[in-house]
Image: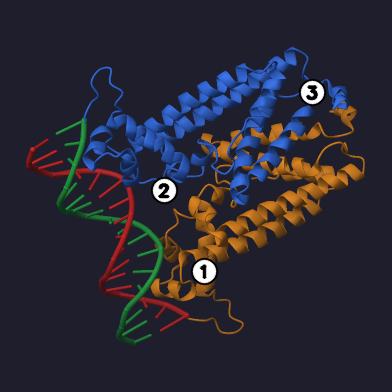
Chain colours: A blue, B orange, C red, D green
DNA sequence: GTCTATAGTCCGATAGAC
DNA sequence: GTCTATCGGACTATAGAC
């Protein structure tokens, strides 16, 4: 027990607390996740938890910052695999997602306790902004390469692309159905195709 | 006190409870709205509340069903004013909305307590489905009239249109900014324009 | 149909020994 | 750093008088 000896693979209490919180924030949201539940899942005593994290906000903020770093890194690597900018945007939309669980970040925004606390809201806002700017850059590159029309605001369209995925999660949770999620994505891909310059290419389907 | 005499304009306790619940569900969501808060706003005693509504679910379900009926009716009238089907879809997107408050229905979907209870989930799912089918019909009519291309799935695009508005609320709440909401809508209108057959008409702007 | 009083539970947080 | 015990408060719901 206690701090792991150098080189050992024992996971520290602090680490287990953060990981358990990350899972529970996704499963239950912020307000509905209780410190008791976190303690139980992390197998950590009451006192230890408050030793490492004075308040629930401290723990949640760290968990969310870690979510941001990990998801942005993963998405960046994923998008870098795309053969072209416009294909990257399509890849973003069609990336496999569990619609019923909801977006780790998007879910948070509907909780007033998160929105009213800067330490909790900031990681959510920053990550969604990061996503939007990443997509915007793909759109700009696609315009420069002549894949996409150049008569639209890449900033606005990027925001709409992000919103489609967020909205897809809302629809899927309302219907408790992955089909509802997939239908939104299908529609998003159709809408995106309207920005393509190579529209005659559609005939080869 | 008590039941209003025939013809009087006194609002019954029951009615005040439902109205207070409707407001609070929008402001705070389901889980974060406490019976005590409802009682206070409705100015109704503890016992009266449980006389009319045995549980919190009973009260919330009635409030949500009333929301559905009212909002669907309002949206229907609003869309009927549009001069054409495709203009109706544009009107749906650009309808003035308070992004920071969130959609009355969409907000509910991120709350597990709502999603896990059929009596609470059903009104949310039914209303979102109603909206989607209403937009789908506009798209179909627009295709028939030659306003829109006829080579896309109206069902999928309608779902994406609804999702854009839901996602706009998520972005606006994350950023606590109406500007973020408006940016998504602007992008949605651009994407929608790509489905128009009269694309040369863009030159007259 | 309305009221006050209160039950029983869980919440987030603290105390203090080891 | 970890533990158990416990605080004060808010929650949803019930009891029972009027």
Choose the circle earlier in sequence order: 2 or 3. Answer: 2
Tell me the quarter of the picture where residue A19 sits: top left
Q: Secondary structure at mark 3?
A: loop
Please give the chain letter of the residue carrying mark 2: A
How many residues crowd mark 3 within 10 Å: few (<14), some (14–19), many (20+)? some
Left or right: A93, with D16 as reference point: right
Q: Secondary structure at mark 2?
A: loop
Q: CA distance from mark 2 to mark 1?
A: 28 Å
Discs 2 and 1 lie in a common subunit = no
| Pointers 3 and 1 within a single chain | no
How far apart, in angstroms, are the residues tagged by discs 3 and 1?
53 Å
B194 and B10: which is toward the camera = B194
Residue sitting at x 76%, y 51%: B133
Quickly name the residue at label 2. A32
Q: Residues within 10 Å of mark 1 (few under 14, many from 20)?
A: some
- Which quadrant of the rendered structure holds the C terminus of chain B? top right
Dot 2: few (<14), some (14–19), or many (≥20) neighbours within 10 Å?
Answer: some
Q: Which residue is mark 1?
A: B16
Whether label 2 touches label 1, CB < 8 Å: no
Q: Nearer the viewer, residue A181 or B59?
A: A181
């Amino acid at each position: 027990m206690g701090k792991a000896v150098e080189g050992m693979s024992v996971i520290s209490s602090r680490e287990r607390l953060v990981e358990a919180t990350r899972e529970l924030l996704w499963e239950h949201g912020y307000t509905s996740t209780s410190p008791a539940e976190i303690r139980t899942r992390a197998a950590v005593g009451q006192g230890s938890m408050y030793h490492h994290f004075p308040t629930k906000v401290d723990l949640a903020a760290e968990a969310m910052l870690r979510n941001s770093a990990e998801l942005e890194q993963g998405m960046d690597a994923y998008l870098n695999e795309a053969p072209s900018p416009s294909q990257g945007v399509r890849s973003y939309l069609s990336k496999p997602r569990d619609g019923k669980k909801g977006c780790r970040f998007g879910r948070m925004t509907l909780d007033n306790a998160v929105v009213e606390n800067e330490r909790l809201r900031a990681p959510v806002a920053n990550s969604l902004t990061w996503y939007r700017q990443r997509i915007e850059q793909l759109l700009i590159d696609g315009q420069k390469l002549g894949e996409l029309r150049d008569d639209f605001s890449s900033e606005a369209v990027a925001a709409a692309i992000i919103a489609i995925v967020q909205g897809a999660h809302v629809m899927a949770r309302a219907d408790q159905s992955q089909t509802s999620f997939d239908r939104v994505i299908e529609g998003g891909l159709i809408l995106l195709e309207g920005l393509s310059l190579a529209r005659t290419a559609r005939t080869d389907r």
